[in-house]
Amino acid sequence: MTDAHYKKLENIYLNANLNKEIYSNTEIIISKNYSEIKMPIKEDYFHALKAIHGSVYFKMLDDAAFFASQSVVEDYMLLTASFNITFKMPVPNGYIKSIGTLCSVSEKEFTAESKMYNSKNEIVAFGNGIFKKSKISIDSIKD
């Protein structure tokens, strides 16, 4: 894999409509078997108990594991086949950082895990998932 591949993936992530419109202050770093995504907490992400909603946990954990997997695939985009998360504690302020790592690769599947940390570097959630190749070539995606 090359730095150009990682940069393309970073741009794909940052230029996705969802990330431009809702998660606009997100940062991402991708390297072989690894991704790190960091985002400041905004009240827009809160549920009624004044902490970030579970959907934000899921997105950050899934994205980190996904891009750790995609880091080793240069021809086609991957898709999430399954993803499980475990919540440890709420996050009411500061920032969150998710770190994804690729665990294993088989002929048809990529298995990855991710951990989410708060501003105090405490693990607030973790997850793992299975990713499979789609029929969409990476070259067809605008970055």
Image (cartoon, rainbow, N blue to C red):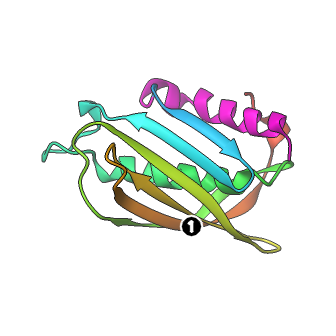
Who is closer to the viewer here, 18 or 25?
Answer: 25
Report crowding for label 1: few under 14, some 14 to 19, many 20 or more residues within 10 A (C-alpha): many
Q: What residue is shown at x 52% (from left), y 60% (from top)? A: 114
Q: Quadrant of the C terminus?
A: top right
Residue at the limit of the structure toward the bottom, as seen here? 106
Q: What residue is shown at x 24% (from left), y 38% (from top)? A: 93
Q: What residue is shown at x 72% (from left), y 52% (from top)? A: 70
Residue 23 lies, in percent from the top left, at 44, 31
Look at the image and say whether residue 16 sits in the magenta stretch: yes
Mark 1 = which residue? 129
State the predominant SS element of the stretch in magenta: helix
Who is closer to the viewer here, 32 or 12?
Answer: 32
Q: What residue is shown at x 29% (from left), y 38% (from top)? A: 45
Numbered range of the magenta stretch? 1-23
Residue 5 is left or right of residue 14, and the answer is: right
Who is closer to the viewer here, 64 or 46?
Answer: 64
Residue 50 is left or right of residue 138, and the answer is: left
29 w.r.t. 66: above or below = above
| Label 1 secondary element | strand
Residue 12 is left or right of residue 47, and the answer is: right
Circle 1: residue type: Gly
